Image (cartoon, rainbow, N blue to C red):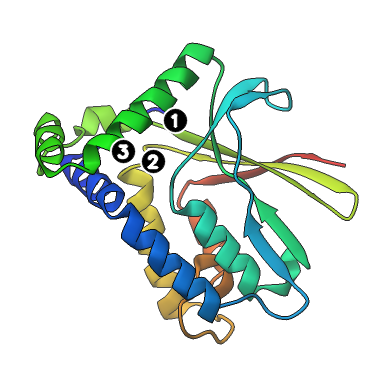
Amino acid sequence: MHGTFSGGTVASALEIMSRYRAGTVTHEIRSQVDSPPAGRRSRILTGRIGYNRAIGSWVVPMPTIDPQVVVHSARQLPRYGPDFVYSHYWASKSPLAAAGMVAGGAALFTGAQVPAARRVLKRFRPSGSGPSLEQREKSWFKVQFFGEGDGVKVQVEVSGGDPGYTETSKMISEAALCLAYDDLPPSSGQVTTASSMGNALRTRLQSAGIQFNVLLQR
C-alpha cells in the first residue's frame, strides 16, 4: 500500500492500543459465550516474522482487527469449512523495512500504554489533519489472499486507490446501499459483511472501482 494517515486515525489507534489488556479480557469472555457451532472450528493462527517464498517477501504479523472479523464470518457461514484457520501479514521486499515495521510497532504500542507518551505521539499528527486530495490521488492498496482447502489452492488479489479515505468511503457507502436495497439473506445479532451481505456487496464494490481478481487456482 501507499498512503498516509489522518490525526483521527492515529488517535483511534493509540486509544485502542492503550486498552489492549481490557480488550483481551472482553474477547475471552465473549469467546466463551459465542462459541463456534458444533462440528466446526474457526481460529486465528499466530504468524511468525520471516521470509515467505510464495510471494518472495518478508512478512510481519499485522496486529489489526481484520483476523477477528474473518474468523467471526467463518463461525457464521458453513461454506468456510469445518476447520478454518486464518493468518494476516504485512509484506515487504526489504528486510530492513520489515525490521523497521516491527521496531516501530513495538515502540508505538509501548508508548500508547503511558498517558504522557500518548499525548506526545498525538502531536505528530493532530486531529483534523490528514492527506490532501493530491496525496489521496497518488495512494493505492493491494491485498493478496492465499487459500487452501480440499486439495485446491487459490490466490486472489483485492486492489484499489487510496485505502484510508477514498476506498473506505466507497466501502461504507456501498455497504449502506446494499443493506437498504439488495435482496439479502436474513441475519441478526453481531454480523460481518460476509455473513450479512456476501457477494451482493462484492458486486457493488467492483462497480465502484475496487478490483477482485483470481491470480491462481489449481
Percent x, y of residue 21: 34, 56
Mark 1 lies on a secondary structure that is: loop
Q: Is residue 28 left or right of residue 55?
A: left
Residue under the image location 56 percent in, 67 percent down: 72
Amino acid type for the residue under numbered disc 3: Phe
Q: Which mark is residue 174?
A: none
Q: Is residue 147 above or below residue 200?
A: above
Percent x, y of residue 213: 65, 43
The CA span between labels 2 and 3 is: 22 Å
Q: Earlier in the sequence, mark 1 or mark 3?
A: 1
Amino acid type for the residue under numbered disc 1: Met
| Quadrant where the C terminus is found in the figure | top right
Percent x, y of residue 144: 61, 38
The CA span between labels 1 and 3 is: 22 Å
The residue singled out by tag 3 in the image is: 109
Q: Nearer the viewer, mark 2 or mark 3?
A: 3
The residue singled out by tag 1 in the image is: 1
Look at the numbered discs 1 and 2 and tell me whether their residues touch, using CB distance below 8 Å.
yes
Q: Nearer the viewer, mark 1 or mark 3?
A: 3
Front-lying residue, 79 or 84: 84
The CA span between labels 1 and 2 is: 8 Å
